[in-house]
Image (cartoon, coloured by chain):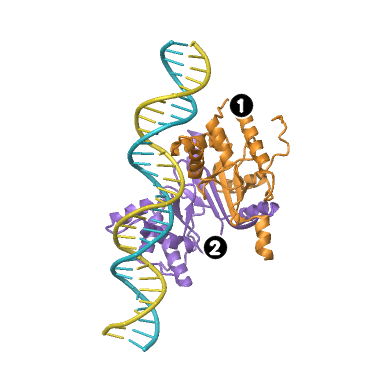
Chain colours: A purple, B orange, C yellow, D cyan
DNA sequence: TCATCAAATGTTATGATATAACGTTTTCAA
DNA sequence: TTGAAAACGTTATATCATAACATTTGATGA
């Protein structure tokens, strides 16, 4: 599969439980390679591996879970190992930090500049990123009413994803 | 002053540096007393004191700063002392937790049900709560596009408050 | 080649935030 | 006045994150 055709790669909606997650991972890794190449940033083996581990699912992953995973693979790893890799990934927009969870999640669209807008299911733990530009603009407009100049916005919404809401409502 | 007339109590906009902050504190304490009385919740001396300490300014306060303050007053205090008080205040809507800062701030309008919408100045550290119902509705509408049912939303916006933006722009 | 520098990573220690678990005191009502 | 529940005290520990310094790696040019 040529990495120049990531057309349908997206996690901007909730995935079915049985979806082909390998495609999510591969797409994210290809996008990361591409982005780092363009920016002259080095996606080292360690950083790439940490990114892959962050993408193990659509749930946020804690730094120490990543640390355990690296150690399980026989790597020499300590907290700074993983935090440095995470800092790199954050600085290049490849992952996001979920403040409420103290955890990290892969960014499905590292190319677009965007606000962090996350829907977090309380039932299954799945998190998706919305990337709703109009909503971001609405936030900036509200802030402007208070004379506030926005640098960065972070929206974390808790609730129930379609699958879990159905389950809760129907049964 | 009768607690039934808290008409002009509000921190829904940025305060001048020299404003009469004692009024902010007194208003918040009066509102808390009132709210706890109505809900049959006990605003003990400790809880009241922690709330007052949280209101020392319009900046978020960390749990361990509160702990130090309590100890400085000669109280027996340990982390659970302050976290339990904070949990009480959170559960009754008297304070909010700022996830990004791992810190707490007083809620200027504990009576209204509302989303957490905060503007946080990177320069001076001041935080204000917006309480923009339309914005909350916009968030819910965006979430609904993804079939997501919202339970709770948390918006943390970083940027520059009017005073600091003026300083940065003008000088 | 190999000297050199910067970036990346390894390593040790510690700081900062938060909670578990259990004992004691207070409160309040029967 | 006693029994139960809530609040608070106390000790220990879990969890998240960074400081500081040593070593390795990789690119560059003499």
Q: What residue sits 41% from the left and 63% below the top?
A: A29
Q: Secondary structure at mark 1?
A: helix
Q: What residue sits 44% from the left and 65% below the top?
A: A32
Left or right of residue A80, residue B28 in this image: right
Question: Residue B9: x, y in percent?
Answer: 70, 39
- Disc 1 and disc 2 in contact, CB within 8 angstroms: no
- Which residue bears the numbered disc 2? A112
Residue A57 visible (yes or no):
no
Question: Residue B15: x, y in percent?
Answer: 68, 48
Mark 1–mark 2 distance (CA, rounded to whole Å): 50 Å
- Which residue bears the numbered disc 1? B37
Question: Residue B73: x, y in percent?
Answer: 51, 38
Q: How many marks?
A: 2
Q: Is residue B118 above or below residue A41?
A: above
Front residue of A33/B51: it is B51
Front residue of B114/B18: it is B18
Q: Secondary structure at mark 2?
A: loop
User: Looking at the rendering, in which quadrant would you find the N terminus of chain A?
Assistant: bottom left
Question: Residue A23: x, y in percent?
Answer: 41, 58
Q: Is residue B58 above or below residue B78?
A: below
Q: What residue sits 57% from the left and 50% below the top?
A: B156
Front residue of A59/D9: it is D9
What is the chain identity of the residue bearing mark 1? B
1 or 2: mark nearer the eye? 1
């Amino acid at each position: 599969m040529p990495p120049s055709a990531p057309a349908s790669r997206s996690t901007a909606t909730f995935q079915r439980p049985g979806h082909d997650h390998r495609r999510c991972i591969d797409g994210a890794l290809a996008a990361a390679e591409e982005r780092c190449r363009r920016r002259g940033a080095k996606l080292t083996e360690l950083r790439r591996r940490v990114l892959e581990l962050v993408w193990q699912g659509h749930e946020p992953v804690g730094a120490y879970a990543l640390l355990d995973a690296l150690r399980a693979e026989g790597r020499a790893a300590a907290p700074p190992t993983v935090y440095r890799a995470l800092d790199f990934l954050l600085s290049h927009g490849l992952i996001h930090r979920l403040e409420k969870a103290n955890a990290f999640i892969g960014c499905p669209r590292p190319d677009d500049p965007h606000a962090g807008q996350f829907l977090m299911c309380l039932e299954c733990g799945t998190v998706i990123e919305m990337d709703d530009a109009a909503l971001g603009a609405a936030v900036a407009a509200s802030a402007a009413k208070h004379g506030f100049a926005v640098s960065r916005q972070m929206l974390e919404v808790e609730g129930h994803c379609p699958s879990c809401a159905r389950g809760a409502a129907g049964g």
